[in-house]
Image: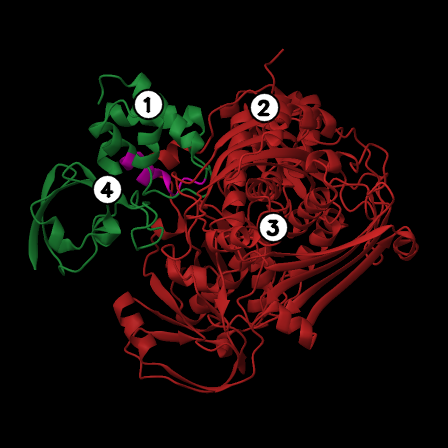
Chain colours: A red, B green
Amino acid sequence: MRESISKPIQRVDGSAKISGEAKYIGDMHFENMLFAKTLRSSRVKAKIKSIIKPELPEGYFIVDKDDVPGFNRMRTVVSDHPLFAEDNVEYIGQPILLVVGPERETIYDIITHISIVYDDLEPLYTLEEAEAKSTVFTDYHYDKGEPDKAFAVAVTIIEDEYHTGYQEHVYLEPQGMAAEYRDDTMFVYGSMQCPFYAEGALTEALGWDAKRIRVIQTVTGGAFGGKEEFPSLTACQVAVAALKTKRPVTLIYDRDEDIICSTKRHPSIVRYKAALNQNNDVIALDVDVLLDAGAYNGLSPVVLQRAIFSVTGVYNYLHLKVRGRNFMTNNVPSGAYRGFGAPQTIFGTEMLMHNIALKIGVDPLDYKMRHMLRRGDPTCMGGKIRDIVKLPEIITRVTEMSDYRNKVQNNVKYKGIGASLFLHGCGFTGNGEQTIQGKIILKKSGENVILKVSSTEMGQGAETVLRKIVAYSLDLPIEKVLCEAADTGLVPDSGPTVASRTTMIVGGLLRQACLELKDRWDEAEEFEVSRSYKHPDFLNWDNDTFQGDAYPVYSWGANVAEVEIDPVTYEINVKKISAVYDVGMPIDETTLRGQMQGGIVQGVGWATIEVMTTDKGKLIQKNLTDYKVPTSMDIPKIDCEFVSNPYEFGPFGAKCAGELPFVGAPPAVVAAVSNALNVPIYSIPITPEDLMEMDSHEN
Amino acid sequence: MKIEFVLNYKPQIIEVDLARRLLDILREDFGLTGVKEGCGEGECGACVVLMDGKAVNSCLVPAGNIIGKSIVTLESFKKTERYKMIESCFLEAGSVQCGFCTPGIVMATESLLNENPNPTEKEIKEGLSGNLCRCTGYNMIFKGIHQAAERGKGLW
């Protein structure tokens, strides 16, 4: 009998990364390679009247909308973002054209000599203005029970509004892409999460069959959602440039450029009306979710779906009225970021529950526990919680680890403790998995097994985890289980590497294929086994009415945060986070712990120091000097444990993990800050200036 | 202008614009791509190399400042016993995820342990304060460094 699959092994890509031998896109050299640089809009919203171009030196090119042989839009959920601007620009940083050539200095010089004549138009700067002008991209609704009746009989009605800000991914490796046109095929290489998204976008931009396109992921230096849809844009741009110049073209962003133009977490406003009964329990919620999608809708409708499907958090409210809207503003487009809309609404709902508890004078954790979902309860969309909810066990453990009960009763000013309860729906939202129909192939090759999937390693440990699932299933050493490159010419489309779906969905398909491969092992020296995703029969979902099981299963968790506020500067020092998670079964404890620790710190950053704002359409924080992410000096001590709760349909019982820690940390930290100063908090990031004002107001 | 410096223990004479960044000299002129560019403004530490034994952000060092200096990059450091100790401890502790910050963190670790072979947790945090990592949340890197210091007694 082998040891538990949870027992850590060394990451398969560790040595190459530590030694600096791993080749990221910026480390690759192509023969006769040209460099590209993007000329971007300097205007918030304007009509382009004319572009005055200098005479180009020999070997230099300008690539723009007129060079796109196919459709000049980036294909995604809503294909509205032009690859190169056409008549108008809609945000500062929007790409207009590329200058391509052999020497970077000359390229910069050419860019400074291109002048664009704009005719400025009236822009929309903020979500509030967008709401006033009703520039709605997407408007969703759903109800549960009889909310109107519940509000009519409510003893108390509480209304609150919560705000969250931008967040920049700050993957350490900036965006980068290269294209090479040879043998009548377009080869595109780059830092990305989803090679088949890029392939799909390229088929439309070039107007070519996918057979003539190969997208190859290079070692990817962090992504967090920031390399989900955005690389489709740069992939199309470099491909168009490579086609025009007939030479390999590489486009690597500087950090400043990356921050200005790449997607970010959606700023949000979430408005609540809560109906309370005579026991002060919430019987109904009316929730209105507003997201700033920026200038183009892109992926935002799906982000909005996860946002509104997460509004109830871990609670069972009998009656619900939910509305969600994406608004168009003339800000940089928002997009995928770890948690994908859920962090905004989970934060709002956790703080609503916290603040109601303070109003009625009970401990916030006790108040939350009165409302928790249990097995068999309906979800907010009328689906069902099918598995055991281990929240009671999780809460017992996390309160022991943090000594919550004792500390919360001996509250000292400027020291605070707070708890959050949370969940995350595993895998794609709604019918996403059915639409994608992820496919995997396992190839037996002598004594080795080769795993063919499009799931990408971006730092999270996917390659290690997937190889481990196969190795354990076939009882092989991990060295005998190899992974084919994430190259659309060599692997089937297993779906994108998003939505915490890789271990559970792709790993689950691999595990099934292993069972067949094991049975047939002696059949031949070389053969392949494949599997495609089949939606379990018991799950139902109606994407028009948003009724049914939006997710097959949920992962759960609780965090307790402890903070100290500097009484003079009001800086928040997050001292400790205690965290307990149910992710089904850890496939590799070290890899999983890495996800949890990293997710918590990103969440702490979003809630506290990561301030990103715009002034009249212009980002104020344009580089890593202005935009602060947590450093080694800013991080809390983190204690993290797991409860086992194997999921029948996950490989070895595994559910989702990567986004869950991000969702949980911010409300715990904010609850602790609220506890430290005895003030309600409605907005993140919480700045020292805000805290100072709240505290002086309180006094 | 012609300048002389020592790169990975070999004397070099190169013709270079004195304003050219050490980062570009290393990556482009010498093909040393273990040195990474994460921000180009000295905030992230992905481009850390050793200059006369001290950790520096090579994006902030112009060619004029390396005249007569000794530069050591990961490509040379990885041949040492100290590196092997750091590597095995980082692998065990889960100190690496996407790996883009890792070369800089390895060089910062060498610089830290060279100056202080028995760092406290606070000293490890301070030693890494110039290196950003967005994946790990740092604690598992601290653990790797702590283990390297413990197990590598006598190496530094």
Whole-Å distance between the Cαs marked 1 and 4?
A: 19 Å
What residue does disc 4 label?
A: B49
Please determine if labels 1 and 3 lie on a single subunit. Answer: no
Secondary structure state at the residue bearing disc 1: helix
**Foreground disc of the pair 4, 2:** 2
What residue does disc 2 label?
A: A401
Residue A291 is covered by the magenta coloring = no
**Foreground disc of the pair 3, 4:** 3
Circles 3 and 4: CB atoms closer than 8 Å: no
In-front residue for pair A92/A362: A362
Whole-Å distance between the Cαs marked 2 and 1?
A: 28 Å
What residue does disc 1 label?
A: B148
Residue flagged by tag 3: what amino acid is it?
Answer: Ile
Please determine if labels 2 and 1 lie on a single subunit. Answer: no
Please determine if labels 4 and 2 lie on a single subunit. Answer: no
Circles 1 and 3: CB atoms closer than 8 Å: no
Secondary structure state at the residue bearing disc 2: helix
Residue sitting at 71 percent across and 64 percent down? A325
Residue flagged by tag 2: what amino acid is it?
Answer: Met
Q: Position of residue A288 (x, y in %)?
A: 74, 60
Count all numbered tags in the image, as a single digit: 4
In-front residue for pair B71/A559: A559
Query: Is residue B152 visible to the viewer in this orientation of the structure?
Result: yes
Residue B100 is covered by the magenta coloring = yes
Whole-Å distance between the Cαs marked 4 and 2?
A: 41 Å
Q: Which mark is drawn over residue A681? A: 3
Q: Position of residue A2 (x, y in %)?
A: 60, 13
Circles 2 and 1: CB atoms closer than 8 Å: no
Whole-Å distance between the Cαs marked 3 and 2?
A: 25 Å
Host chain of mark 2: A
